[in-house]
Image: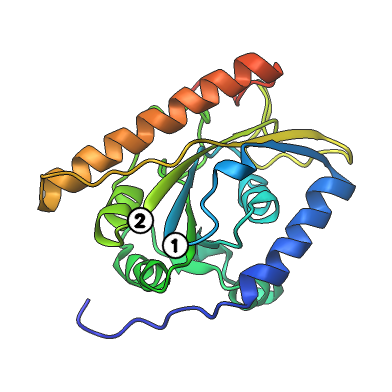
């Protein structure tokens, strides 16, 4: 990371959030809980479970803070890619995410919000494993982590990219912030933070699912 990363501007996520809010309160039927748990200021990492393409838009649209979301590079093509760039989202190569992490770290250093799916790809949504990106950002960005549970975007028997009819019931809950700072350093600190984050999201997903009756995707 010797070159200075190009940090996305502050404005894009705000109008991007407006589009997401419209999609999930008018087109679909989204409800949220725990918005008051999200710190109003300071660097934060919003770390959510991932099971469907709708998870990104719902996280952006329903978050109390306007986040820069890490989005896979395959989506940055054509008009949709232009929309993502304009909305301040961060292009990430899942085989080598260094550039994306450097940009995200820059956002955190200026006190902004980052959205990330620690699982790295769409799965069952139960967060049985996690990659190190969220933990690395929290440790190096001195950021609090807010675990996020997203339910209803994918249900048992449905595909990862399946289209949904209007007024689909979706639920998002923001958990209590986690401070992952410790006496550990380097890879040990990141590994511990990664597991702490994974466990917190998994627990929130299980609890929210039990309370709302909304499950996650097919077992994988």
User: Around disc 1, counting alpha carbons within 10 Å, would you say few (fewer than 14), some (14 to 19), or many (20 or more)?
Assistant: some
Q: Is residue 24 above or below residue 215?
A: below
- Give yes or no for contact between labels 1 and 2 (Cβ–Cβ under 8 Å): yes
| Tally of marks | 2
Q: Nearer the viewer, residue 70 or 163?
A: 70
**Number of the label disc, if any, that sits on residue 42:** 1
Circle 2 SS class: loop
Q: Taking the image as drawn, is residue 59 in sight?
A: yes
Note whether 141 is above or below 129 in the view shown: below
Tell me: 68 left or right of 181: right
Residue 218 visible in the shown view: no
- Image coords of residue 58 (percent x, y): 68, 48
Dot 1: what SS?
Answer: loop
Q: Position of residue 204 (x, y in %)?
A: 51, 27
Query: Which residue is nearer to you in this view: 99 or 104?
Result: 104
Q: Identify which residue is drawn at 62% across, 49% down.
A: 59
Q: Is residue 150 above or below residue 205?
A: below
Q: Which mark is residue 143?
A: 2
The label shown at residue 114 is none
Determine whether, in the image, residue 124 is placed left or right of residue 61.
left
Identified at 67% across, 46% down, the residue is: 54
The structure's colour scheme is rainbow
Q: Closer to the N terminus: mark 1 or mark 2?
A: 1
Question: Which residue is found at the position 28% from the left and 34% from the top?
Answer: 195
Q: Nearer the viewer, mark 1 or mark 2?
A: 1
C-alpha gap between disc 1 and disc 2:
8 Å
Residue drawn at x 35%, y 56% is 143
Position in image of residue 205 (x %, y %) = 53, 26
Q: Position of residue 44 (x, y in %)?
A: 44, 56
**Quadrant for the N terminus in the image:** bottom left
């Amino acid at each position: 990371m010797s070159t200075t990363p190009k940090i996305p501007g502050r404005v894009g996520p705000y109008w991007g959030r407006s589009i997401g809010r419209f999609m999930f309160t008018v087109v679909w039927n989204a409800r949220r809980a725990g918005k008051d748990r999200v710190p109003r200021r300071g660097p934060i990492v919003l770390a959510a479970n991932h099971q469907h393409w709708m998870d990104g838009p719902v996280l952006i649209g329903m978050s109390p803070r306007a986040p820069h979301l890490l989005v896979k590079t395959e989506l940055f093509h054509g008009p949709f890619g232009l929309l993502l760039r304009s909305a301040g989202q961060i292009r990430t190569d899942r085989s080598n995410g260094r550039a994306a992490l450097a940009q995200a770290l820059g956002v955190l250093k200026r006190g902004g919000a980052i959205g990330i799916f620690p699982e790295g790809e769409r799965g069952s949504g139960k967060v049985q494993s996690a990659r190190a990106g969220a933990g690395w950002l929290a440790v190096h960005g001195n950021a609090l982590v807010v675990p996020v549970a997203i339910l209803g975007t994918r249900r048992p028997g449905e595909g990862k990219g399946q289209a949904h009819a209007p007024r689909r019931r979706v639920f998002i809950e923001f958990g209590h912030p986690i401070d992952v700072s410790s006496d550990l350093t380097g890879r040990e600190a990141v590994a511990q933070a990664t597991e702490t984050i994974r466990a917190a999201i998994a627990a929130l997903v299980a609890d929210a699912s039990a309370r709302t009756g909304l499950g996650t995707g097919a077992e994988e």
